[in-house]
Image (tube, rainbow, N blue to C red):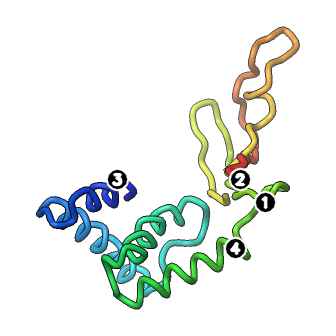
Amino acid sequence: MALILQHSALNPASPSAQYSQRTALEWFETQWKLTGGKGAPKNINTMAPFYCLAELIAQKRTDDPRWLAWCDEWAEWIIHDLPKTEEGGFQHSEFCFLSRTSCVGESKALGDVFEGASRPYEDGKRSPASSRHVSLTTDFG
């Protein structure tokens, strides 16, 4: 979505830039309709497209009141409810079940690397990814 936004801003009068802007706004329109105006469940991943929408609003390239209200709602969530690290950065955690080849689970926010697979044993080798439940967390602050 960020690339579409950047392309649409290069030369806003060009047909290709206008097409990019329409594509972005149509994506939000589709999400709005599919979710009855609620949008995807709020987490660090689903907030990413709102950068594009907020920029389109800030640049006065859309004046649909739904989009401003939607951005305001998500901004309030980011400020008050998005999980934060101890330093106040945005937190993204993955809670998942790891097998040798897959991580299947539920995204909660980003993360620390799970023990074992990220930390070498004393002999310098990494541990194999065995089946276990882990939490991954990364500080983007």
What residue does disc 1 label?
88
Is the C-beta separation of discs 3 and 4 under 8 Å? Answer: no
What's the distance in space between the residues labelled 2 and 3, CA to CA?
A: 23 Å
Identify the element where label 3 is drawn.
helix
Identify the element where label 1 is drawn.
loop
Mark 4 or mark 3, which is nearer the start of the sequence? 3
What residue does disc 4 label?
79
Is the C-beta separation of discs 1 and 2 under 8 Å? Answer: yes
Q: Is residue 1 left or right of residue 75?
A: left
Mark 1 or mark 3, which is nearer the start of the sequence? 3
**Residue 126, how many percent across, how many down?**
74, 18
Q: Which mark is residue 141?
A: 2
What's the distance in space between the residues labelled 1 and 2, CA to CA?
A: 6 Å
Mark 3 or mark 2, which is nearer the start of the sequence? 3
Mark 1 or mark 4, which is nearer the start of the sequence? 4
| Three-letter amino acid code at the position of disc 4 | Ile
